[in-house]
């Protein structure tokens, strides 16, 4: 009878924890759906395929010795680890009055058809229209000896090349590769996105979730089972005086 009672109690405990695990899975699913919904809503509202981008390169960092350090969200240049908010833009809406010109996000020009797609963040120096297509002269704020807001020399500007026609011209980059312009920056938050982009980061997050589930649900089951199988100590009544 005691064995049957323990078995029934164990089944009940497993059932209760199964319900808790199911609720946790439902919660994680709701969070994932909410995140995806927010992402797609951001893409629609900001009119760009990449509404949020982490800054991983120091080419926009004016203080090269302190890249990735403390930064104010309203600074007019960028720092490593920033998360930038990007709004879709066309060539006509881009501000070109350097040093108050826009910081733009482009798809990186391709040297060949096998090159992976990636983004580049840089500031517009000037723009020029050729055969109905607008091309941008750009430069990273932290590049060269004349760092932003100093006026750069021509040799300090970015030199772009793409094997496809009308994507680059004379070192300039075409509006065909324009993703959008930076409208806001959030310091440090970009480190989380950069961490999650690496396989090691994803692996660590998965392992932590598994450990939390084990500690929260599996360990209590075995602890309760052990407590139920241990013989109970009899409580002796105090002897009468």
Image (tube, rainbow, N blue to C red):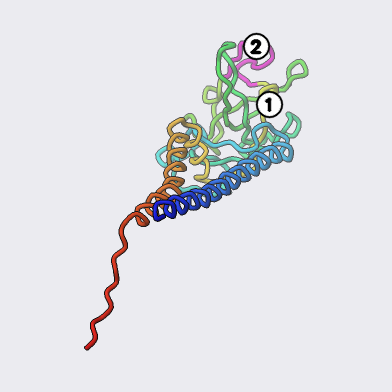
Frontmost residue, 66 versus 150: 66
Residue 138, image x, y percentages: 60, 27
Q: Position of residue 213 (x, y in %)?
A: 46, 46
Residue 130 included in the magenta stretch of the image: no
Residue 47 vs 34, above or below: the answer is above
Q: Is residue 170 above or below residue 29?
A: above
Crowd rating for badge 1 (residues with CA inside 10 Å; few <14, some 14–19, many 20+): some
Q: Residue at x 63, y 45 (%)?
A: 30
Q: Nearer the viewer, mark 1 or mark 2?
A: 2
Label 1 and label 2: CA atoms lie apart by 20 Å
The image quadrant where one finds the C terminus is: bottom left
Residue farthest toward the bottom in the current orientation of the protein: 241
Q: Which mark is residue 100?
A: none
Q: Residue at x 48, y 49 (%)?
A: 11
For marks 1 and 2 on the same chain, the one whose residue lies earlier in the sequence: 1
Instruction: Judge the density around disc 2: few (<14), some (14-19), many (≥20) Cα neighbours within 10 Å.
Output: few
Q: Nearer the viewer, residue 223 or 69?
A: 223
Residue at (64, 21) in percent of width and height? 173
Q: Is residue 240 visible?
A: yes
Q: Main secondary structure of the magenta part?
A: loop
Q: Residue furthest right?
A: 132
Residues drawn in magenta: 160-173
Q: Is residue 219 left or right of residue 18?
A: left
Q: Nearer the viewer, residue 177 or 36?
A: 36
Can the viewer see residue 146? no
Left/right of residue 173 with respect to residue 91 in the rendered view: left
Q: Which residue is mark 2?
A: 164
The quadrant in which the N terminus is found is bottom left
- The residue singled out by tag 1 in the image is 127
Residue at 65% in and 39% down: 36
- Quarter residue 176 falls in: top right
SS label for mark 2: loop
């Amino acid at each position: 009878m005691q064995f049957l009672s323990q078995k029934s109690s164990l089944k009940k405990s497993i059932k209760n924890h199964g319900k808790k695990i199911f609720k946790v899975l439902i919660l994680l699913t709701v969070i994932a759906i909410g995140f995806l919904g927010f992402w797609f809503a951001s893409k629609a509202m900001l009119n760009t395929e990449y509404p949020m981008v982490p800054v991983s390169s120091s080419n926009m960092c004016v203080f090269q010795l302190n890249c990735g350090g403390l930064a104010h969200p309203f600074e007019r240049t960028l720092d490593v680890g920033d998360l930038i908010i990007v709004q879709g833009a066309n060539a006509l809406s881009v501000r070109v009055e350097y040093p108050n010109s826009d910081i733009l996000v482009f798809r990186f020009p391709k040297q060949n058809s096998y090159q992976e797609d990636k983004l580049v963040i840089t500031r517009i120096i000037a723009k020029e229209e050729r055969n109905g297509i607008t091309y941008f002269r750009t430069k990273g704020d932290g590049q060269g000896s004349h760092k932003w807001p100093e006026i750069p020399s021509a040799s300090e500007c970015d030199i772009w090349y793409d094997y496809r026609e009308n994507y680059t011209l004379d070192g300039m980059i075409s509006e065909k590769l324009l993703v959008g312009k930076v409208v806001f920056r959030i310091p440090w938050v970009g480190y989380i996105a950069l961490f999650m982009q690496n396989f090691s980061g994803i692996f660590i997050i998965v392992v932590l979730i598994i450990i939390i589930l084990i500690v929260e649900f599996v360990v209590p089951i075995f602890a309760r089972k052990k407590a139920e199988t241990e013989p109970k100590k009899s409580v002796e009544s105090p002897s009468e005086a």
